Image: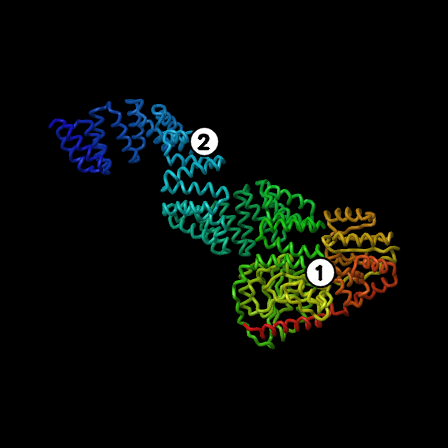
Amino acid sequence: MSFDPNIYQSAVVHFSGGRYHEALTTLSAMLEASPTHPEALNLAATCCYCMNRHAEAESHWRRAISESPEVAGSYSNLANLLLAQGRLSEAESIYRQAIRIKPDFAEAHYNLGNLLNQLGRPEEGEAALLDAIRVRPEFAEAHFNLGNLCKEQGRAHDAERAFRAAIAVRPDHAEAYNNLGIVLRETGRPREARAALRRAVALQPGSAESHLNLGHVLHDAGQAGRALAFYRRAADLRPDYPEAWLSQGAAAHTLGRPRDAESAFRASLAIRADDVQALSGLGLALSDQERFADAEAVYRHVLELDPGSAIARGALGHTLHQQGRAREAEAAYRTALAARPDLASLHYNLAGLLGEQQRLHEAEAAYRSAIVHKPDYPDALNNLGRIVWQLGRLPEAEGILRRALVLRPDHSDAHNNLACTLKDMGAMDEAIAGFRRAVTCSPANKIAHCNLNYALTYHTEDPREILDECLRFAAYHEAPFLSERVRHPNDRNPNRRLRIGYVAPDFNTHCQSLFTSPVFGAHDHEAFDIVCYSSTTRTDDVTTSMRAKVDLWRDVHELSDEALAKLIRDDRIDVLIDLTLHMSRCRPLLFARRPAPVQVQWLGYPGTTGSSAIRYRLTDPWIDPPGRPDVDARYSERSIRLPETFWCIDPRVTSTEAPKVGPLPALANGHITFGCLNNPCKASERTLRMWAAVLAALPHARFLLLAPHGARERLIERLSALGTETTRLEFVNYESRDVYLQTYNRIDIGLDTFPYNGHTTSLEALWMGVPVPSRAGETAVSRAGLSFLMNLALGDLVAHDDDAYVDIVSRLAADVPRLTDLRATLRPRLEASPMMDAPRFARHLEQAYRDMWRAWCDAPD
């Protein structure tokens, strides 16, 4: 049978309709009659190829080439088959034969270019693609693949040009828009990238890749919520797309939704089980949920897969750190740094660990290393500033923190730390403004808001201003807990032995221990079971001594507020006492969870927490005169007045030995030496005016002040502006407690501060024989001196206005015989007073606890 065009056309119709078997049957009959017909052989080969009968396809194309070696298309088709079978070298040779026969064969140039790039010969591949474009400038796929080749080589601008050429030829080329968007993102042109990717999504709504890449651009722009929506759509379109789930996890992490992040990372791992990136993301999500043991297991698995990963080793260090395994954490950080000393984040995390251990100089060095490797690292600058502040180098700390804020003006923690530094330098107006900025930048910054609340007690004379700010704190931070109904199963027997819990971070060599230690030792342990919840990170001999005085000691510095609240409930505490209020390392959100039926605040300073969860505050009749509703309205808590004093001290708790009271310095010096060893932040403008007036009234007197550098220069400037000769001023720095107490042997009269009186400082001065006349005001902290002096029967040393204060101090300075007598009698007078009678004070305290407990027992559930 000769070649019949109609039969051939019938085979073509079958082929076009996807009926390859029928087409091949038709062609087989033709090829029996005309076995060398090139068109029939080519079509038969193509049918076989489509039916995955590759050996037959190859045989047909080789016969076609043999019979018609001048037909370039047969070579190209055979090469395509060989390429599909992975026979790349053979395919290359055949493509080249096709091009030799037909130099303007654009598809052959194009396919050869793709093959050469696949063989790792991108320069030759690029030349072939350029030949395809030269032959056919409107060849969109050649432009597109040239763009891909350039992109893989990191030649972003060449890639951009090629993708734009593909789009110019074919405006509906969704893949070209997608890849153009990728390149534009990589070259830092987010707006153009977003536009290109939006076009890609519009042209191809079913493309998971385009949705994913648009999500990346939005995530980069800080629009994590919108990015998450595109990542989710990508996963909906292609559920087996691990990158879509991985990106969902990253966006959820950015949004602070660690549970969603965990779910997404686990979905990614279900597709690609040992993907290190997804595992690392899962570890981060678990850490964000404080599931550090689970995170540790994940990071250890990552290190099994990639033992040399410094990032994973550093992340492991973080989880160990958070579990309180400091030695293991430090070892992990240092191992990671040995492998990657250039990773700033590793230096940063190590520095944080060292800082917590009070290895401040080592922490400083580690933060500086982080900054060397990443100069624009505001978090490291912030923490370095904080460490330098802790080391007492205040002006240097100020400069570092201001650098952090230049890099990130809304850095809440940096504003907070700068404010702390300014406070210690005595710049209280600036400090309070800084704390307010910190809270404005991040209303959730609990530490900054606590610092603001406490700083106001140094600054304002209006108790309502303090209460209003504390109420704002409570309204924001306690809100998540207010709706929870808390039931306490405690036995409502009003007369049984009560479990009393004290919560504090300073059960060690700290001024607070001067008050807590004697009380713990004097408690009636038959009637009261005393439990301490210690957040102390640095224990010492004082800690050991205090531990021996209580019935149960709990080290809880590693526990979250939620975990500690559960522990307190499990311990069946009846009365829980907050000893810190808004001072450093306080735990207001522990008390917001109401772990005990009766909650009380005492000791940190006389004031208010603003908390609706703390029902009572302890005070005394001098701080808060009874019978005055306007005084009680200054606090969110109900004021319970101890009958004599708010304070009970034993100054010997943290001293190696009690220093002796020396003779009155004025007897040897021939002049009065005033002194103030309070924190310089208490030196308000009003205080300085009173001090300057005293010094003006006594032109031969001298003034000894405690002030570190930074605060010292500011005090000199401010007192000089008020007419005080700076040659009359002498400064000392912070010293050990024994040296500090001996300093009082150089002082005749202590000058108090206002509106925040000296508290511990004044009691220590009195114990060292130094009288401290005091100016009383309206806020609780401005009435501490009044309370001390009334309990010592020295009410004549209390002033209720500034002029009276200057007059009282001036008269006392002129009365050397009285000063001599006070020098000899103040210590025994203090020791005989209620302020050093721990058993007497403890009975008053216990009666207050019992009365509070009875009120709870009588109240309806």
Q: Is residue 276 visible?
A: no
Of label 1 and label 2, which has the lower sequence position?
A: 2
623 or 600: which is nearer to us?
623
Residue type at mark 1: give it. Thr
**Residue 474 image position (x, y, % from top left):** 59, 59
Whether the residues at callouts 1 and 2 have beta carbons within 8 Å, the answer is: no
Q: Say which amino acid is labelled 2.
A: Arg
Q: Judge whether 229 appears above or below 676 on screen.
A: above
Q: Examine the rendered structure and indicate whether residue 345 appears above or below residue 747.
A: above
Element under label 1?
A: loop
- Identified at 86% across, 63% down, the residue is 818
In which image quadrant can residue 500 be found?
A: bottom right
**Dot 1, crowdedness within 10 Å: few (<14), some or many (≥20)?**
many
> What is the number of the mark on residue 477?
none
In the image, 30: left or right of 445? left
Image quadrant where one finds the C terminus: bottom right
Disc marking residue 779: 1
Residue 172 in view, yes or no:
yes
Q: In this view, does 798 lie above or below 127?
A: below
Mark nearer the viewer, 1 or 2? 1
How dense is the environment of label 2, judged by Cα within 10 Å: few (below 14), some, or many (20 and up)? some
* Residue 161 in the image, given as x and y percentages of width and height: 43, 29
Distance between the alpha carbons at the discs numbered 1 and 2:
69 Å
Q: Quadrant of the N terminus?
A: top left
Q: Is residue 484 left or right of residue 767?
A: left
Q: How many labels does the image show?
A: 2
Give the residue displayed 55% in from the left and 70% down from the top. 572
Residue at the image point whose x is 56% and y is 66% from the top? 595
Secondary element at image label 2: loop
Q: Position of residue 376 (x, y in %)?
A: 58, 40
Residue at numbered disc 2: 155
652 or 241: nearer the eye? 241
